[in-house]
Structure formats: C-alpha cells, structure tokens
C-alpha cells in the first residue's frame, strides 16, 4: 500500500502513470504541465486536443509518449481563492479521480506532483495534507498493492506549517547532542566507544551472520570453531562448550522484535492489517516479519510500528531495543520522531511530512 514522498522532477520518474497538474483546456501551460508536454513531445498535445478539455477535479488519461511512463493522467486542480470556495473538495476529487483512472488502467505505480500548489496558489502544506490523506485512504480502501509517489520538486518549500516547522526546530535545538562531543564525554575517545561491546553484539542478525559467514568460509565446517576460527585439538572441548552456552543463550533469549510486535498488536486490539497500514508498511514485509521470529527490521521500520501502535517513549525504546537499536539525541530524525511521540501525535503522514521537510529519511515505506 505504501505512499512515498520523494524529491524529483516528475518527468524523470519511472512508473506506470504520472499525473499532470493541468488546466481545464488540457492544451498545456506553464509549471509542471509545460515540463510534461516538453518531455513527452508534440504527440501528447495532439492526443490532448481530442479529449475536449476536462472539468476541475476530474481526470483524463493519455499515453506517455517520450516520457518514461506508460500514461499521463491530466487533472485540473482548483485555483486557491482563500480556502472557502470548495478548494479542498475539488483537490480531493483530483487525487481520487486520478487514482481511480490509474487503477482502471491497471497501473501499479503512480506519481503525483502537488497539484494546485504552484501557479494555482494552494498553500503547499495544506496541498500536501489533502494529497496524503486522499491517497492513503484510496490505497487502504481500494488498491492495497498500488505504490504511489508524491513528487516534490522545489528544494526549499515548506511542506509543513511554519508553526510546526519552528516548533520542531526548537525541539531539535533543545535536544540535539553533538555525537562526537557526547561520545568523548562518556568514554574519552571515539575509538574506545567503538570497542565497547554493546547489546548489539548479541543481536539476532549478528548471530545469523556469524553462521552465514562461517558456512561460506573455505575452512571445512568440521575444522571450524563457532565463529570460523581454525580448530586445533585443544580447542574442541571449548568449542563444544561455546555451542552449549550459545544454545542456552538462544533458548533463554528475550522476546524477539517480531514477538513483541505481535503481542502489542493484540494488546491494542488491532488487526494486523490495521497496524501495517497505519505504519505505512508493505503487506509483504509485514508477512516476513510475522513469519520469522528472529527477523531484524531496519530502524525506520521498527519506529514506524512504534508509531502505528501509539507506543509511549519507553515502550518505543523497548521495541527498538528488540531490533538492536536505540533512540539517539545525536540523530535529528530520532529527535523529530520523539517530538511527535511525546506530543502523542501518531499520524505517520504528518510525521513523514515533517521528516521530509527536515530532509530526513521517512518512516515505513
Ligand atoms: N516535477 C514535480 N513537481 C513539479 C515540477 C516537476 N517537474 N514542476 C513544478 N512542480 P504547477 P498548479 C511542482 O504550477 O499549481 C499550468 O500552467 C510545483 O513546484 O505546475 O496546479 C497549468 O496549465 C508545484 O508544487 O501547477 C495550469 O494552468 C506543483 O508542481 C496551472 O499551471 C504544481 O505547480 C496549474 O497550476
């Protein structure tokens, strides 16, 4: 289902359909419309002439011609006129009708610009909110396997309100800790820090990898110690012991990430699908996590689930720890996520918009 926000020129995006922020004549114009027509070549205008225009909020489809996409879906957005003139309903219709057309044309991947947010003057933060809400609802209700990109072009546009931006800015300023400074304070030098064994040394993935690496080694398996060391006779007994100790460790290992995730889903009375959709996580990835007790997710995936489950900061730390991670005040993205968790704002779209505005990696997809 996932919704992605990316920074790019939409005419360069490879997917089944891109959406054009057109005008009602469908005969081209400035902004993204002009760029799409230029990149597609004159054949596009020729086909557009046969369509007889399009009403605001509706959508029509053409081929993509020289663009790296099969189709272009043209939708004229509303002109911003203060916000009380049906702008939101019309903009919602643009996204809904474009997605419906994409689905009817069997498109699996679709890219949208922020319709109406340029020449038509719709405030970008509100335009993005309409876009993400409508797309998420459509994906969740009608097209769980479709992948949709919101493509943002300009480098410095605010995608969240200035108030939220400056609130987060202050929260970062209050909490950000310079990593080097922090490490030195705690441990004297960075090298020392790198040598300190951490709980990650026992994390599932590292244990998996040790097995994997040792099985790929050129040393025959019966001549290898547990971590791939060459065996000598005197090492045999201690190797046996290592094995036994490790088996005991594995058996008595704490609840894994996947187990904690499933337990929390049950405790919250959520359905699995509700949880992974809310986390903006792909159904296939969720199935993998569910079926592998020792699955080690990325930090962003773990955080996305923490948000979907509406965990407190302490619970979030616990869940992260199961995956071998920690929340860090030397990571801007962690501080931004913490800001939302502390404020009990658990809407992943809002969080992702903020992460995007601060040029950080998004949660979930
Ligand atoms: N890729 C992605 N986004 C882009 C690109 C690009 N190549 N170029 C611009 N944008 P606009 P509107 C962003 O003005 O507001 C035309 O003349 C841009 O930063 O293209 O719906 C039509 O013919 C902005 O955020 O469309 C209509 O007359 C967003 O795309 C009128 O403009 C939309 O900006 C439509 O105005």
Image (cartoon, rainbow, N blue to C red):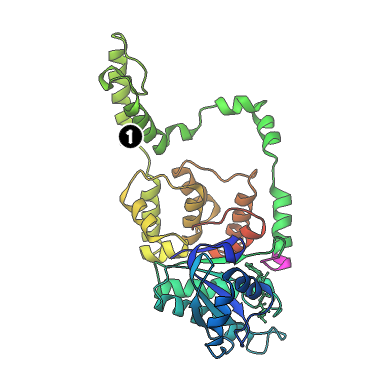
Q: Is residue 229 above or below residue 357?
A: above
Can residue 347 be seen?
A: no
Q: Is residue 321 above or below residue 186?
A: below
Q: Identify the secondary structure beneath mark 1.
A: helix
Q: Is residue 102 rendered to the left or right of residue 208?
A: right
Viewer-nearest residue: 3 or 208 = 3
Task: Give residue 118's position: percent from left, percent from top.
Answer: 69, 74
Point 59% across, 76% down: residue: 42
Viewer-nearest residue: 126 or 17 = 17
Q: Which residue is mark 1?
A: 250
Q: Is residue 118 rendered to the left or right of residue 194?
A: right
Q: Is mark 1 within 8 Å of ligand 1?
A: no
Residue placed furthest toward the left: 222
**Tally of marks:** 1
Residue placed furthest toward the top: 234
Task: Give residue 12's position: percent from left, percent from top.
Answer: 57, 62
**Quadrant of the drawing holding the N terminus:** bottom left
Task: Find ligand 1 in the image and state its quadrant.
Answer: bottom right
Point 40% across, 79% down: residue: 104
Task: Give residue 3's position: percent from left, percent from top.
Answer: 50, 65
Point 62% across, 25% down: residue: 191
Q: Is residue 214 above or below residue 317?
A: above
Task: Give residue 324's position: percent from left, percent from top.
Answer: 47, 41
Magenta highlight on residue 77: no
Q: Quadrant of residue 157?
A: bottom right
Q: Is residue 287 rendered to the left or right of residue 343?
A: left
Q: Which residues are magenta?
A: 158-164
Viewer-nearest residue: 15 or 113 = 15
Q: Is residue 138 rendered to the left or right of residue 86?
A: left
Q: Residues within 10 Å of mark 1 (few under 14, many from 20)?
A: few
Viewer-nearest residue: 77 or 105 = 105
Can residue 7 be seen?
A: yes
């Amino acid at each position: 289902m996932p919704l992605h926000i990316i920074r790019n020129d939409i005419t360069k995006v490879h997917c089944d359909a891109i959406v054009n922020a057109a005008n009602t004549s469908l005969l081209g114009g400035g902004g993204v419309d002009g760029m799409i027509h230029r990149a597609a070549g004159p054949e596009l205008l020729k086909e557009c002439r046969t369509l007889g225009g399009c009403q605001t909020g509706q959508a029509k489809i053409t081929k993509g011609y020289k663009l790296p996409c099969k189709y272009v879906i043209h939708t004229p957005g509303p002109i911003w006129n203060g916000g009380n003139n049906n702008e939101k309903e019309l903009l919602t219709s643009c996204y809904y009708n474009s997605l419906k057309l994409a689905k009817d044309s069997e498109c699996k991947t679709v890219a949208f610009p922020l319709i109406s947010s340029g020449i038509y003057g719709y405030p970008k933060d509100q335009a993005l909110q309409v876009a993400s809400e409508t797309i998420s609802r459509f994906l969740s209700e009608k097209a769980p396997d479709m992948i949709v990109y919101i493509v943002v072009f300009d480098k410095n546009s605010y995608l969240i309100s200035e108030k939220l931006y400056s609130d987060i800015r202050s929260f970062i300023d209050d909490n950000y800790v310079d990593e080097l400074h922090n490490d030195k304070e705690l441990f004297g030098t960075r090298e020392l820090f790198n040598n300190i064994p951490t709980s990650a040394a026992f994390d599932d993935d590292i244990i998996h990898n040790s097995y994997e690496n040792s099985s790929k080694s050129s040393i025959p398996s019966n001549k290898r110690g547990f971590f791939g060391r060459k065996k000598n006779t005197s090492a045999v007994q201690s190797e046996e012991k290592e094995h036994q100790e490790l088996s005991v460790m594995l058996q008595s290992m704490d609840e894994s990430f996947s187990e904690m995730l499933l337990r929390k889903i049950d405790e919250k009375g959520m359905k699995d699908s509700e949880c992974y959709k809310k986390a903006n996580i792909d159904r296939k990835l969720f199935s993998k996590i569910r079926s592998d007790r020792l699955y080690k997710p990325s930090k962003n995936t773990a955080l996305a689930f923490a948000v979907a489950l509406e965990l407190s900061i302490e619970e979030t730390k616990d869940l992260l720890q199961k995956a071998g991670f920690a929340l860090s005040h030397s990571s801007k993205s962690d501080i931004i996520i913490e800001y939302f968790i502390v404020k009990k704002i658990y809407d992943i779209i809002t969080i992702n918009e903020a992460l995007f505005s601060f040029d950080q990696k998004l949660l979930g997809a």
